[in-house]
Amino acid sequence: QVQFVESGGGLVQRGGSLRLSCAVSGGTLDLYAIGWFRQAPGKEREGVSCIMSSVGNEYYADSVKGRFTISRDNAKNTVYLQMNSLKPEDTAVYYCAATWGSPTPSDTVDYDYWGQGTQVTVSS
């Protein structure tokens, strides 16, 4: 069974950086579009970034454009989310999600597989 596992979360000060990883097991990463979502306490899950499978087109939410970068290494079966210039409002549990084909990047219902999440906390 294919699984997606996030790692790389932690506590960082405002302006700091973190790199999240989403590793796939039991499957081949290059078949999947991968999205990153986040959910803060009391808020809905929101799309942060997405990278498509074949061409590698990328999507970013307005709130993270210029600060976050998504990339994929199919040889390592891993997608990364490099997060720079972090702000306290970036604090959330971050999830990676996957699906075949071309999802609407920020639509949770378009994704079939979800990781367990990793906590990112940005202190002020």
Image: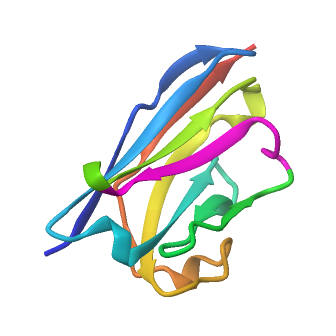
Q: Residue at x 41, y 31 (%)?
A: 8
Q: Residue at x 49, y 76 (%)?
A: 54
Can residue 52 be seen in the rendering of this structure?
yes
Task: Indicate the position of residue 124 as horizontal and vertical percent values.
Answer: 75, 13
Tell which of 17 and 119 is nearer to you.
Answer: 17
Q: Is residue 80 left or right of residue 104?
A: left
Tell which of 72 and 99 is nearer to you.
Answer: 72
Task: Indicate the position of residue 49 as horizontal and vertical percent values.
Answer: 65, 57
The residue stretch that appears in magenta = 63-74
Q: Residue at x 70, y 36 (%)?
A: 90
Image quarter where the N terminus lies is bottom left
> Which image quadrant for residue 112?
bottom left
Q: Is residue 79 above or below residue 10?
A: below
Tell which of 115 and 61 is nearer to you.
Answer: 61
Q: Is residue 50 left or right of residue 114?
A: right
Q: Is residue 85 above or below residue 90?
A: above
